[in-house]
Amino acid sequence: MALQEGRYGLTYTTARPEAVEAFDGMVTSYLGFGRDIGDRLKQVFAADPDMPLAHVAKGYLFKLFGSGAMAERAKKVLAEAKTRAETHGVTEREALHLAALEAWCAEDVDRTTACWERAVLEYPKDALALRLAHFNHFYAGEGRMMRDSTARVLPDWSKDDPDYGFLLGMHAFGLEEAGDYAAAEPFGREAVERNPADAWAVHAVAHIMEMQGRHREGVDWVAGLERDWSATNNFRFHLYWHQALFHLERGEIDAVLALYDRQIASDLDADMYLDVCNGASLLWRLEMYGVDVGDRWKELARVSLRHAEDHELIFVSLHYLMALIKGGEAQAAATLASHLESYANAATTQGRVAARVGTATAEAMAALARGDAATVVEALYPVRYDLYCMGGSHAQRDVFEEMLVTAAVEADPMLARALLAERTAAKPNSAWSWGKYAAALKATGRDQAADLAQARAAGLLSAAAG
Ligand SMILES: [Fe+2]
């Protein structure tokens, strides 16, 4: 089949230039969390139903759902893509994409990412490969890889490239997850200046503010740009989640619950894993902060019931488990936990994650829910430094750190005191952490230091209220 040239001089196996134009539009939609990505893909197929890379992209979209059912559909699409590739031939770049989808369907996520990174080495402006690699680095917890993956292509891009702003936003987030907040922020702000609807860039700056304890500024940042980013797909609910976290730190519980009800849990029937992650981790945090969340777990549990045997992303499965445990679905929770245990024997990327941290975290969550603080500490403390490998962001994984310190205050106050000394040093603006630190100090006989920590917590909350 003939080759057509698309954006950035990339070539595609197709006889139809309009198929390539539609493909470029689909990639930009993907970069911007567009609601029209499915329609864009349909436009590509309408122009050329045999374009090999269109079939690969369709497989990617199914895999990005992160669910077992969608992974099965991706496998069927992979077979279609292979047939097209055999019939029409593919370029070297398209062959790398096909190999990536094949590896992804075989649950070899590391090899998948390696294929995309290879494509980006040869074609630094392959924005699809770049963004997908960014996604997989994220779900491997590899902030440094996210940072470096975009840093190495920045010199190849021009400020005039239409997707350049998205590259800046990705780079900002990689720097943030690698811990370089000062370097990250200008990249994120420049991306948002170029395009205030770039939800990933808005999100990168929100993460910087979260990590630096800039809670008031964080609320203003996210809310101030809401009109732009709220036009995106369900990713917008993750930005509302960030807004809720800032309010939570400030003790503004009514605002947190209002965001939960009006936004974060408003589209659970769409069955998007990130919605459940947002909801479950927020409700679990609220309960650890002493808030009665009423019957809000029920809806999250109802959606999670469908995913008790998913293992696409262990990070996500653990959030389904939170919902099942708290939503009164004991049998499904047990099914999910035992599925994680058996999947921990699988020779796959996420199988290794399940073995390294998944089963221990699942055990800890069940123990915390039944009030067995000692088991929580026993399960979670030894894997504390490995938790990153389940992926997600520092801010998202912090819920597991909060579980550990909550349990430790009860079961092992000396350990809690040490963990909370660390935590308050890293998060000096966290009132909740100072409050827990006060409890641990008190339990270990350090009354004077406990009073000071309690005063610090109260001072932060009253400053927020004032
Ligand atoms: Fe986030």
Image: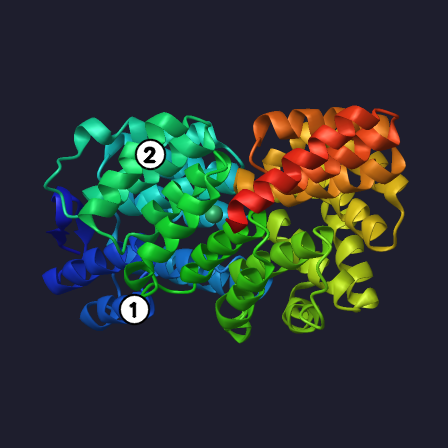
Identify the residue under disc 1: 36
Element carrying mark 2:
helix
Residue type indicated by callout 2: Glu
Q: Nearer the viewer, residue 464 or 84?
A: 464
- Image quadrant holding the N terminus, namely bottom left
Position of residue 9 measured from the top left corner of the image (x, y, whole percent): 12, 43
Which residue is at the far front?
A: 466
Position of residue 26 measured from the top left corner of the image (x, y, whole percent): 25, 60
Residue drawn at (33%, 34%), measured in percent from left and top?
A: 185
Residue drawn at (19%, 27%), measured in percent from left and top?
A: 155
Residue 307 visible within the image: yes
Q: Specify the quadrant of the image occupied by residue 387.
A: top right
What separation in Å lies between label 2 and label 1 (alpha carbons)? 29 Å
Identify the residue under disc 2: 185
Element carrying mark 1:
loop
Looking at the image, residue 239 sits to the left or right of residue 227; the answer is: right
